[in-house]
Image: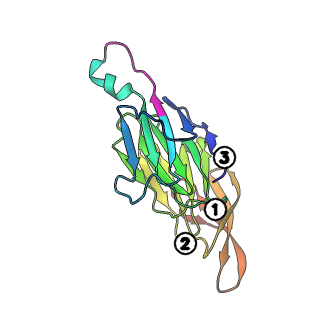
Amino acid sequence: MTAPIFDGSFAHRWTAEVLPHRPMILPPRHYTYPAVAEEVEKGAMEVLVRPEAGPPGKTEADSRQEPFLATCALGFRDPSAPSGLWSMPDPDWICAVSGGYAYLIDVSRPERFTMVPYRPVLEIVPVVEQELLLLVGHHAILAWGRNGEAWQSDRLSWEGITITGIEEGSLRGTGWDMMTDKDVPFVLDLRTGQRASV
């Protein structure tokens, strides 16, 4: 696994760090992602997350402001599968990626999370102007917005997507077509994920 990436493009109400190894003494709050996994500790990414303190006097939320340890199961050891932490359009969520397995976690309620279905996610692209975090797989792109999943593209490639540009609400890229054995250009409307004319 290569050194973890940190991308804080979106405003966020937390700080987090990838630890070099699991602490000898676990903090009172410890969550494993996914919740049910075999041998999750082998190569797992350990992330210490500190939610930002809220306004004083909100005692009901005090426990939600305590740090927690997120143990994120490793996907692949291949260096092309990214690992790291990304801020998200919702400032209370974090995207933790461990060897291409992506976990979207609500830091105020860490038991709430989504594991992105792509195995692996190969690229994570923040598009701040559109309030989208793009998660790129081998065949398609999933866009996550402030209120959750915004859209998922149709199949853009048989094996590998290259993003060539993002401008004026459109995403341009290429995907490999098995029938012609060529990279074919595509354009997506970032609001809907639908194809637009090239």
Tag 1–tag 3 contact (CB < 8 Å): no
Please, is residue 57 above or below residue 68 in the view? above
Q: Which residue is mark 2?
A: 155
Q: Residue furthest left?
A: 60
The range drawn in magenta is 49-57
Question: The disc labelled 2 sits on which kind of residue?
Answer: Arg
Looking at the picture, how far across and down is residue 135, in whole percent? Answer: 55, 55
> Who is closer to the viewer here, 19 or 13?
19
Q: Residue furthest front?
A: 24
> Who is closer to the viewer here, 99 or 152?
99
Please identify the quadrant where the N terminus is shown: bottom right
Mark 3 burial class by Cα count in 10 Å: few <14, some 14-19, many 20+: few
Please, is residue 174 above or below residue 6 in the view? below
Whichever of callouts 2 and 3 sits on the residue coming sooner in the sequence is 3
Q: Which mark is residue 78?
A: 1
Whichever of callouts 1 and 3 sits on the residue coming sooner in the sequence is 3
For the residues labelled 2 and 3, the Cα–Cα distance comes to: 30 Å
Question: The disc labelled 1 sits on which kind of residue?
Answer: Asp
What residue appears at the point 59 percent right and 50 percent down from the top-left corner? 83
Whichever of callouts 1 and 2 sits on the residue coming sooner in the sequence is 1
Residue 93 image-quadrant placement: top left
Q: Which residue is mark 3?
A: 3
